[in-house]
Image (spheres, rainbow, N blue to C red):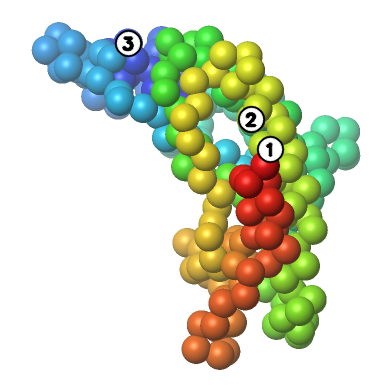
Amino acid sequence: MCRFAHPVTFGYYPLSIRLAAGNRLPKFTEAESRLLKGSLDFLGLNYYTTNYAESAPLTSSRNRSFFGDRQATLTTDKNGIPIGTPTALGWLFIYPKGFRKLLLYIKEHYNNPIIYITENGLADTNNNSLPIKEAIKDSLRIRYLHGHLSYLLKAIREGVNVKGYYVWTFWDDFEWDAGYTVRFGIAYIDFKDNLRRYLKYSAYWLKRFLLH
């Protein structure tokens, strides 16, 4: 977050990044800094899950990388207990509380910008052995959306300036790191029948939610 939000809010990278990256970090001129400061119209935010973080200071100046620069080890469990309900993707655990905490962090640290939630959702396993009438019963996705929208509302009531929300995604698609092995959509795509579409239970739930 700070890699992007900090420069366009304040005109420079935060001290933590400057210390970690050193001479590898591009320098802004004074003119560039003035142009960057306050230049965002809104902040687009993708949220799926939360990780635990543990300090991992660099022990060597060799083999530095993006992952080393953050000086933290991320994990999805603590003392063997997952941070939330597991899903079809090993990195994605359901933890709606993290959504609110991230939104409040942005409000408090980046001058409460206008925010659009540009992605929020989970993946189901693409189980081709299931009949379509069973595959569209995505109760876990409904739980995910209900939990996250509830905590989004809490954040808005606490002053976070959210103007829009986009569920990820409208239909099942090709995911960049998982191909067609998972399904993110609220509409089921039958890849074996000319891409015929079927609304999942989550689509009907979301429709009722929006109408009320």
- Residue under pointer 2: 152
Q: Position of residue 49 (x, y in %)?
A: 66, 40
> Is the residue marked by circle 1 packed among few (<14), some (14-19), or many (20+) residues within 10 Å?
many
Residue drawn 78% across the image and 55% down it = 140
Whether 44 is drawn above or below 180: the answer is above
> Is the residue marked by circle 3 packed among few (<14), some (14-19), or many (20+) residues within 10 Å?
some
Tell me the kind of residue under disc 2: Leu
Count of marks overlaid on the render: 3
Q: Earlier in the sequence, mark 3 or mark 2?
A: 3
Whether 177 is drawn above or below 17: the answer is below
- Residue under pointer 3: 10
- Residue under pointer 1: 148
Q: Quadrant of the C terminus?
A: top right
Tell me the kind of residue under disc 1: His
> Is the residue marked by circle 2 packed among few (<14), some (14-19), or many (20+) residues within 10 Å?
many
Residue 123 in which image quadrant: bottom right
Residue drawn 73% across the image and 42% down it = 146
Residue 137 in which image quadrant: bottom right
Residue 79 in which image quadrant: top right
Q: For the residues labelled 1 and 2, say whether their Cβ atoms are less than 8 Å apart.
A: yes
Marks 3/2: CA–CA distance: 26 Å
Q: Position of residue 81 (x, y in %)?
A: 87, 38
